[in-house]
Image (tube, grey):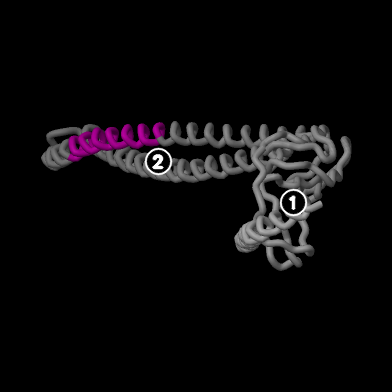
């Protein structure tokens, strides 16, 4: 009994020595925990009134047509650029062919008009050369007429010779007048054909624009995913007629997801990489 009492008395001082260390450890742990909570609260926003939100991209028809193919299902993940819906595009292809034919015709018209300009220019050049020859003929006829007129007054030639010289001069003069009118008409034709080239070239530009528009409309018959994400809200069936502006489906984008706090504060939480 005496020994047990002695051991108990010796143990009490040891417990007193350990108590400050235990208190210090508890204080240090509590301090570290408090600092960690403060740092976390500065870098994170915690609330019980929040919801997860994401961008939703509605996909609408841009041209009218019957749905011929649907290549996705509800809640199926799709990638940007995937073909999801095809519309019957036969009418649109016919419009492209018609626009192409109109463009080809406009190009051919320009070629014909340029050929007309070349022909008119050649005619004008020929008329100009003929005028030069006609002027020489008229000069010679006038010289002969003047000479024969003088000889006629002297009775050195017959009246028939004088009348022939007079007729030749009148004929040469008429020919020059006719050729001058021909040259003028040829020059007018050159100017008109040149203007027609400008008109035809503008027609080519218009037909080219119509062809590009027809091709653009044709491309709208193939509906692709504008973003990567989950397709949902499918509102179409094969064989259904849709009009331009008809909502077809929506894609929940997986590029960014947000957290909304009380509907007024939006902070990006993380980005998904697909």
Residue at 76% x, 67% y is 262
Label 1 packing within 10 angstroms: few (<14), some (14-19), many (20+): some
Residue 36 seen in this snapshot: no
Dot 1: what SS? Answer: strand
Q: Position of residue 63 (x, y in %)?
A: 75, 45
Residue 171 is tagged as: none
Residue at 83% x, 37% y is 67
Q: Earlier in the sequence, mark 1 or mark 2?
A: 1
Dot 2: what SS? Answer: helix
Q: Say which quarter of the image contains residue 39.
A: bottom right
Pick the front one: 232 or 111: 232
Residue at mark 1: 56
Whether residue 194 is in magenta: the answer is no
Residue 62 seen in this snapshot: yes
Q: Position of residue 203 (x, y in %)?
A: 54, 43
Residue at the outermost front position: 2
Q: Position of residue 194 (x, y in %)?
A: 42, 42
- State which region is magenta: 118-142
Residue 190 is tagged as: 2
């Amino acid at each position: 009994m005496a020994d047990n009492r002695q051991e108990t008395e010796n143990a009490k001082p040891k417990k007193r020595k350990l108590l400050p260390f235990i208190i210090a450890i508890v204080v240090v742990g509590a301090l570290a925990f408090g600092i960690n909570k403060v740092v976390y609260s500065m870098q994170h926003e915690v609330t019980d009134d929040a919801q997860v939100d994401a961008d939703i991209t509605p996909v609408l028809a841009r041209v009218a047509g019957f749905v011929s193919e649907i290549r996705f299902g509800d809640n199926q993940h799709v990638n940007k650029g995937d073909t999801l819906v095809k519309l019957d595009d036969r009418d649109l292809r016919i419009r492209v062919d018609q626009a192409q034919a109109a463009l080809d015709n406009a190009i051919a018209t320009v070629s014909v008009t340029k050929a007309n300009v070349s022909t008119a220019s050649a005619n004008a050049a020929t008329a100009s050369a003929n005028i030069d020859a006609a002027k020489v003929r008229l000069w010679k006829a006038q010289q002969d007429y003047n000479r024969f007129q003088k000889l006629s007054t002297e009775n050195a030639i017959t009246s028939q010779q004088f009348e022939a010289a007079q007729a030749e001069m009148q004929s040469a003069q008429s020919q020059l007048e006719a050729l001058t009118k021909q040259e003028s008409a040829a020059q007018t034709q050159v100017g008109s054909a040149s203007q027609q080239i400008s008109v035809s070239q503008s027609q080519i530009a218009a037909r080219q624009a119509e062809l590009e528009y027809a091709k653009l409309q044709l491309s709208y018959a193939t509906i692709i995913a504008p973003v990567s994400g989950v397709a949902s809200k499918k509102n179409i069936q094969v064989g259904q007629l849709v009009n331009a502006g008809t909502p077809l489906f929506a894609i929940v984008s997986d590029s960014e997801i947000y957290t909304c706090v009380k509907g007024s504060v939006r902070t990006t939480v993380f980005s998904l990489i697909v």
